[in-house]
DNA sequence: TGCTTAGTGAAAATGGTTTTCATTATTAAT
DNA sequence: ATTAATAATGAAAACCATTTTCACTAAGCA
């Protein structure tokens, strides 16, 4: 099952079919079939820049293809993460989040998680100033741990504005 | 149930009983009872610097107090997080991790998560160089989002040494 | 010492995710 | 185009960390 995805990788969104062609080639190159559910799920991810949960994707997909099951969504997402087409994040809210890998979208993510009410605040707008230092960190990590960084998330735990009212600490 | 924990907070580990006294005072100050399970769970957390899961703590506690149930471990940990005595982390491995709040232990955490084999590599030794920039980030976040940071974790997703062998990307 | 009720533990429920397995559909060979 | 081989699918069941329920227990106070 686990295969290398390094052989004959076509250039991104070139040739007939645009992104479709790129994706199809990528699947074929890894020895996987390019099925309808996989196309539809990739399309859904391609149509947004949000961080969708498996259920989010399932519901979106269900509108056009009601026959696609949640199981297939999970399996496809796992595969997409494996071949590097999709990023998987854990924001600490009890469900995984998925996002299509794009050149234009930053790989850095930043969230604030309230330990009192559990609310998660997206602080991605803070990333810009972080890009440079993340680059440096990635290089150090790659050397010290022989680890190839794909994407990154920073979570700050603490008290949100509402929950910190009236508390001293 | 949810109470402010700001009233008459005794200084850390002062008075008779050392840490015990400090903890007891902290509980009383919040209107909570200082029960045996809570003492034992705090003792267990105090005896290690690892990031323990609820089950880890349950098993450790079970050796001396077999009558303490897993439910109580979960409930106690939630309370300890609420009153700020314990930090709760989500390292993305499907279970929460807990750590006693200490002055000597840094609040910053760093993990490398392999998207292929799922292995999580602790890169906490990398924190030292991060302290300064984390301070700056915290200040900015506190202002912009009115958020009080307690602790922080940075996760890098990618391929570990074993899994990146033979792959181009 | 006895009251009040916060706290406890066993069992059941919850909810996101994974596994199972019979069926379907993609791909390559004919 | 037809067929064969098998990868992929979907419904249902299983999984597993965590939460809820509820009858019972014990901490703290008068
Ligand atoms: Mn993003
Ligand atoms: Mn730590
Ligand atoms: Zn809050
Ligand atoms: Zn790996």
Image (cartoon, coloured by chain):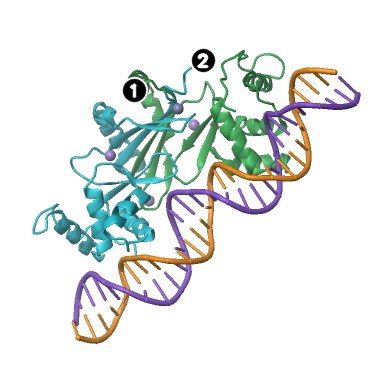
Chain colours: A green, B cyan, C orange, D purple
Estimate how packed mark 2 is, as few (under 14), some (14 to 19) or many (20 or more) residues with alpha carbons within 10 Å: few
Relative depth, front residue between B117 and A108: B117
Mark 1 or 2, closer to the camera: 2
Q: Is residue A134 left or right of residue A5?
A: left
Q: Is residue A33 left or right of residue A9?
A: right
User: In whole angstroms, how far apart are the C-alphas of marks 1 and 2?
Assistant: 22 Å
Q: Secondary structure at mark 1?
A: helix
| Same-subunit check for callouts 1 and 2 | no
Disc ID at residue A117: none
Number of on-image labels: 2
Residue B34: % across, % down: 23, 64
Residue A118: % across, % down: 41, 50
Using the image, determine if residue D18 lies above or below residue B1. Answer: above
Relative depth, front residue between B85 and A46: B85
Q: Which residue is mark 1?
A: A137
User: Where is the N terminus of chain B found, in terms of image quarters?
Assistant: bottom left
Circles 1 and 2: CB atoms closer than 8 Å:
no
* Location of residue A50 by image quarter: top right
Relative depth, front residue between A21 and D27: D27
Is the CB–ligand 4 distance for label 2 below 8 Å? no
């Amino acid at each position: 099952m686990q295969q290398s995805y390094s052989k004959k990788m076509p250039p991104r969104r070139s040739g007939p079919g645009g992104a479709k062609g790129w994706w199809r080639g990528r699947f074929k190159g890894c020895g996987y079939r390019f099925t309808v559910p996989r196309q539809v799920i990739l399309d859904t991810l391609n149509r947004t820049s949000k961080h969708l949960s498996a259920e989010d994707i399932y519901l979106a997909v269900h509108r056009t293809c009601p026959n696609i099951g949640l199981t297939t969504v999970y399996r496809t997402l796992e595969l997409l993460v494996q071949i590097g087409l999709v990023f998987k994040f854990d924001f600490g809210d009890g469900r995984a989040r998925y996002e299509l890998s794009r050149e234009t979208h930053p790989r850095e993510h930043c969230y604030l998680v309230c330990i009192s009410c559990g609310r998660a605040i997206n602080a991605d707008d803070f990333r810009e100033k972080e890009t440079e230092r993340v680059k440096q960190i990635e290089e150090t990590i790659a050397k010290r741990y022989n680890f190839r960084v794909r994407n990154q998330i920073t979570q700050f735990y603490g008290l949100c504005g509402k929950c910190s009212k009236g508390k001293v600490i």
